[in-house]
Amino acid sequence: MVTRAESAALTRRALLDAAAELLDLGGPGAVTLREVGARAGVSRGAPYRHFTGKDSLLTAVATESWERIADQVHALRTDPALPASDKLRGAVRTLLGVGRDQPHLYQMLLRRPGHRPEELGEGLDRVRRQLCGPAGDPAADRMRAAGRFQDEFLAVVAGLVGERNARHYGALLLTSAHGIADMELSGHLDTGGLGTTADELIDTLVRMVADVGETTQRSPDPVDANPTGGIGGPR
């Protein structure tokens, strides 16, 4: 017999899956608690027993997505058979893959913090929510999940350029990857456009960073950069 807790967990899972499907089909505008409940095959009131509203539901979808991406990058980072450059190439392509396969989710994951009620707050208040937010706080959970991806990614970058340079070159790689993803989605990388592909550009980026790593190992000259921000907000 299924317990009440198990039944609640199954319902929540069905709601999250339905919300993710609707997001992929039509973007955030297509996600309403009524449509999510109908797609999940639950009662009309069930979504409201699990989520306070559309924002908390989408935040939970984003949190799970960041955790999944972080898991994939962690698997790459800890694979002893992969060279450091292949780990980095795979990590960047993992993020690009979300942009290709789930563009609405990708845009939601990377939107600028502060555009929704659960993300309001600046400076120390945002840091407090990230580090000390109570269990079950959707905004804090999302920020922690995004931070986990960032930490895994920077660890992969550090494998090539060292820890002191990881944030600088990690920022370069991430901003470049986001630009590549946007250019690909908009069609500017078609053969009739710039005459290159996203994969070719990523290969070039990785080679450039790998060359920097080799140069740094021969003659250490660390980049003097120590940014405090991050994907999920200040770190």
Image (tube, rainbow, N blue to C red):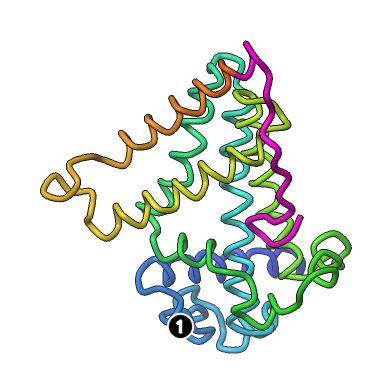
Question: In the image, is residue 14 above or below residue 102?
Answer: below
At x 55%, y 79%, the residue is 42
Q: Image check: 150 left or right of 100?
A: right
Report whether residue 204 is seen: yes
Q: Main secondary structure of the magenta part?
A: loop
As drawn, the residue found furthest toward the top would be 218
Type of amino acid at the residue the image marks with label 1: Glu
Q: Which residues are magenta?
A: 216-235
At x 57%, y 55%, the residue is 65
- Quadrant of the drawing holding the N terminus: bottom right
- Residue 138's x, y, as percent? 72, 70
Does the magenta run of residues contain 65? no
- Residue 220's x, y, as percent? 68, 19
As drawn, the residue found furthest toward the left would be 192
At x 48%, y 46%, the residue is 95
Q: Image check: 104 left or right of 151?
A: left
- Residue 32's x, y, as percent? 49, 84
Q: Image check: 115 left or right of 210?
A: right
